[in-house]
Image (cartoon, grey):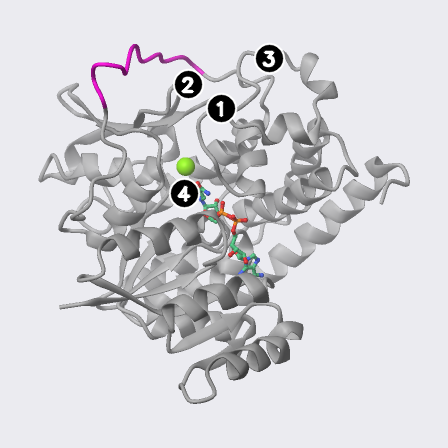
Amino acid sequence: MITSVAVVGSTGSIGTQTLEAVADAPDQYRVVSLAAGSDVAGLMAQVEALRPSLVAIGDQSKFADLKDAVAALTPDLDIEVAAGPDGLAECSRRADVTVNAVVGFAGLPVTLACLEEGKRLALANKESLIAAGPIVQIARRTEGAELVPVDSEHAAVHQCLRANNNPAQVSRLQITASGGPFRGRSARSLQSVTVADALAHPTWSMGPKITIDSSTLMNKGLEVIEANELFGEPAGDAGCGITLDDIDVVVHPQSIVHSMVTFTDGSTIAQLSMPTMKLPIAYALAYPDRFPVSYGAIDWATLGSLDFDVPDRSAFPCLDLAFEAGRIGGTAPAWLSAANEVAVEAFLKERIRWADIADINAAVLLSHDGGTGESLDGVLEGDHVARVLAGREVEHRSDGRT
Ligand code: NAD
Ligand code: MG
């Protein structure tokens, strides 16, 4: 049987690696829908090669361009064209498995549509789960719905948990972090880093937003909240009953151990592979089976040593901001994640300094209004308010830079 796959965010780093993985196992997977944010040309190159039945563009103003391009390509073929959040959501409803590879809060309609349709969600778009945790948990309970993480640390935990048949016997999770390009640097020396410095990740090649998040350790902070959402549900339900206090962040510069689970008897199970996102993508496509093609296999003759350390929480305050937002709960993670999106975008445009990202995130989180995040409207409103507040913080710091 061929599994149909929706790739939403198909032109990005995770999206293109998903298409490569699917191409490696053509007897088992077929892409039926594709979507991107605004890159019509990039999307059309994929449409031409893959001929999906539906293609969507997030940016509504590009709908006519996409429609014309599809019509020019295939006057005789039936490829539907859609746009906006509903178009992205529709892509997901058409497939057995959706890889949500959108960056940022814009991925939320895809996460919700896929789970509410009772389908498999291969989730790379961590921001949707972080911002809308309580709502996603409800959608996750839809019959047939299944959330398999693509984020490498969470895919590792997912695999480690399968080593034990009683989730109540999980005692701690260790989420590993490469430490990013600024590992070992003091807060003082980080005052003058540039966008190019922050984009130079030592072990992973990723899209710009997550690469900056890795440099501030906000990515690791967001991943702690993500782990708590994924695995913090009651044992025997979707999770293993852990809380934020049961999650450790372990700096591991080689990015070979992707995370670990420690059980009540003190035994720790780890998942190891060379750093490539194709493996967790393929894992989420194939689960509970294994993908037929090998990615990231370790050459033990050349591997060398594996090192572990604790994170520097004062040089990278975003990590503790995430723990704080997770403990506040409700829309606090949505506020932090939205503020961070605004701050990272401003940093990438060189409007603010790298150290301003953490300051802006802290200022916005401090203003959190106690929203509970139990309704979609509440989450959307929280995201909006946090963006406005973060935008003002950017203005204060940007000193006329545009
Ligand atoms: P990217 O910037 O390379 O690609 C993002 C994709 O999302 C593009 O296809 C873009 O067109 C699309 N997009 C952007 N805005 C959109 C919108 N408003 N509507 C619809 N589509 C939109 O990003 P990436 O590095 O591939 O990351 C994607 C997600 O995966 C992020 O949530 C990231 O945190 C997560 N992730 C990425 C990696 C990695 O190695 N790249 C690893 C783990 C997790
Ligand atoms: Mg990760």
The amino acid marked with disc number 4 is: Glu
Residues at marks 4 and 1, CA–CA distance in whole angstroms: 23 Å
Residue appearing at x 60%, y 12% in the figure: 185
Q: Earlier in the sequence, mark 3 or mark 1?
A: 3
Closer to us: 212 or 329: 212
Which residue has dot 4 on it?
Answer: 226
Image quarter where the C terminus lies is top right
Position of residue 359 measured from the top left corner of the image (x, y, whole percent): 70, 31
Position of residue 303 measured from the top left corner of the image (x, y, whole percent): 28, 16
Residues at marks 3 and 4, CA–CA distance in whole angstroms: 26 Å
Indicate if the residue with disc 3 has its beta carbon within 8 Å of ligand 2: no
Number of the front mark, 2 or 1: 1
Q: Earlier in the sequence, mark 3 or mark 4?
A: 3
Which residue has dot 3 on it?
Answer: 185
Closer to us: 79 or 120: 79
Indicate if the residue with disc 4 has its beta carbon within 8 Å of ligand 2: no
Residue appearing at x 22%, y 55% in the figure: 25
User: In terms of secondary structure, what is the magenta stretch mainly?
Assistant: loop
Q: Which residues are magenta?
A: 299-310
Which residue has dot 2 on it?
Answer: 253
Task: Say if residue 168 shows up in the picture.
Answer: yes
Residues at marks 2 and 3, CA–CA distance in whole angstroms: 14 Å
Q: Residue furthest bottom?
A: 76
Q: Earlier in the sequence, mark 4 or mark 1?
A: 1
Residue appearing at x 89%, y 36% in the figure: 399
Give the structural element (helix, strand or loop) at label 3: loop
Disc 4 + disc 2, Cβ < 8 Å: no
